[in-house]
Structure formats: structure tokens, C-alpha cells
Image (spheres, helix red, strand yellow):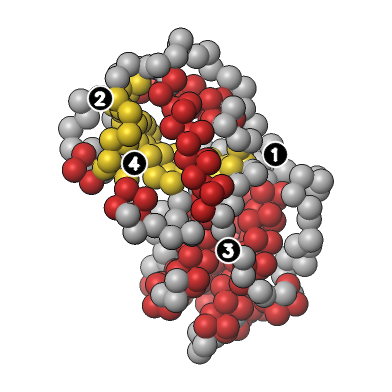
Amino acid sequence: MTAPSFSRRADLLQRLTGCLPSLPGFRALSLFGSLAEGRADGYSDIDLIVTTDDLAAARESLLGLLETVSPLESCWVMSLRPDEWNPTIVFAEESYYHKLDLGLVAAGAANPTIPPEQTTVLITGAAHCAPIRPCQHQVYMPPRGSVGHFFLGECLGGTRYLKARKRGQLFTCYRFVSAAADWCLRALYAAVTKQYSWHAKLATGEYLALDRLDGAARGQEILGALNYATPAHMDNAFCAIMRQLYDLCREIARDRGEPFSAHTFRRMLLFLHRELGVAPSEAGSAFTCLGAARKSEVNDGDVS
């Protein structure tokens, strides 16, 4: 298992604090989470809040501005409320551990998701540069409700599993691996029934339908991975479940005619395997093409 670089994260944070005040309507930049609370370790990510007088323009400009800091790989957006926009950014040349969780918050927002008393203000005042024009960006940003959005969220959950594993938090690891198994069965149900929903895990009636409709082999492969007896078994199980989930989601995306960035997801799964020391052969037969280089592979169905 590799040890992430404190200095690289510090450098990334410095570059972010240098550029984000250029966003339209900028009023304040604040830090929250483990870095703000002084409990960060090498696996901690970066949590920032930008308060702006012009949320729409700041949102439109954000990804192009971040491209000037470091090339972007993916952006997963969680919509919490109309006066906030909450993207999770993965940088292509930084550690997956050091993703950016950003809140763009309208000035004067009532009851923001992260209360001000839980943040550390870094910069205040009007935008310190001339207004920027929206820039082009190259980032995989699947729309909410798509299978790509669902699976990208699960891959980000994989990084959270890694963090818990490296911190020795085995019950937290169980939380993530058991949830991944539940979502894998949700994806199997979607593939079998052609009923696509990513909002909740399977209900009792849906499990009964899956018992009637599944061809047995695929469901049994998922169930066969569920061995949590030791941390090493849990690692193998998590890798196997994520690889099966990848195969199911890619199949569903093809059936629905949706873009699905196989290249992005293979890189994320390769990182998971490498960090856990799990060889592809140890995690089941599915998804055998894990050796893709970072930017050299082109797959059918990929998007940039």
C-alpha cells in the first residue's frame, strides 16, 4: 500500500486557494472537514466552500478555472439544495485520496449544509482578479440519474473504503463493502428487468422478482464474493463486487445508449486493486482488463 504525499496535497490546496477567489461573485473561501479541524492524515481529502453573489456564473466558470490548476478527470455532482452546488472533483494528476469536495454556496443562503461555525475562513472580499470567461474543460461529468453518475458515486465510495482500511476501521470497511453488495444486486435487478432506478436498495418484492428472473450464475457470483471473515477476505470481496458492478453498469449503459467512461472507471478500479494488494485473479473472473495505462487506452463507449 502506498503512502500519499502531504506535500502534494498542500501544494494542491495552495493552488486552489490562489485561483478560486477568481470566480464570479466571490465573497469568501472557507475550509472545512478534517483539515480545518486539525485531524487530517495523509489520506484526507480537501473540503472547501466558496461563497458567491452569483451562483449561476460561478458554477458555469468553475470547471474551466479548475483546469488551470490541474487537469480534471471526473466531476460527480450531488444536488443538495437550490442555493448550493456540490461537486466532487477528481484531478487526473493527483492522488484519488486528495479529491476536492467543493460547496458553491449563494451568499445569504439560509441554513447552509455546512454551518459557518464548522468552517475556517481562508479568504474574504470581492474577486481578486478580473472576471473570468467560461473556459473549456475536459472532464467526465455524468448527469444525475444516469448509470455513469451512479457508478462514479460507487467508485468514490471505493476510495472511502480504502481510507477506512488504511486507518484500521474495519466496521466502517464492512459498511462500505456490504453497501456495495446491495447496490450490485440493484444493478443486477436493473439489468434483468430493464427497470432502472438508483434511488434505493432493493425492496422485498424486488428480491422476490430477482429470485424468479435471475439466471442464477450472475447472482451467485455476487453472493460468492461475500466473505468478510478477515480484512484480507473483505478486500477481495470488495474488489470482486466492484468489478461485477462495473460489468453490470457498462451493460446497462449500452442498453440505454448512455455514455459510460470505461477508461475513467478502469483507472479507478485499478487504483483500488493496487492499494489493497489484490490481484485481478483473486477477485473473480469478471473485468479482466485492468492493466490499462492512465491515458493510453481507448474503449468502446468511452467519453472524455
The label shown at residue 3 is 3
For marks 3 and 2 on the same chain, the one whose residue lies earlier in the sequence: 3
Q: Rounded to the nearest whole Å, what is the CA distance between mark 1 and mark 3? A: 31 Å
User: In the image, is 254 to the left or to the right of 192?
Assistant: right
Indicate the amino acid at tag 3: Ala
Q: Position of residue 112 (x, y in %)?
A: 23, 38
Dividing the picture into quadrants, the one containing residue 28 is top left
Q: Residue furthest front?
A: 7
Indicate the amino acid at tag 1: Val
Q: Residue at x 67, y 67 (%)?
A: 274
Residues marked 1 and 2 touching at CB (< 8 Å): no
User: In the image, is 255 to the left or to the right of 90?
Assistant: right
Q: Rounded to the nearest whole Å, what is the CA distance between mark 1 and mark 2? A: 35 Å
Q: Secondary structure at mark 1?
A: loop
The label shown at residue 107 is 2
Residue that carries the numbered disc 4 in the rendered image: 31
Question: Which numbered disc, 1 or 3, marks the residue closer to the eye?
Answer: 3
Q: Rounded to the nearest whole Å, what is the CA distance between mark 4 and mark 2? A: 16 Å
Q: Secondary structure at mark 2?
A: loop
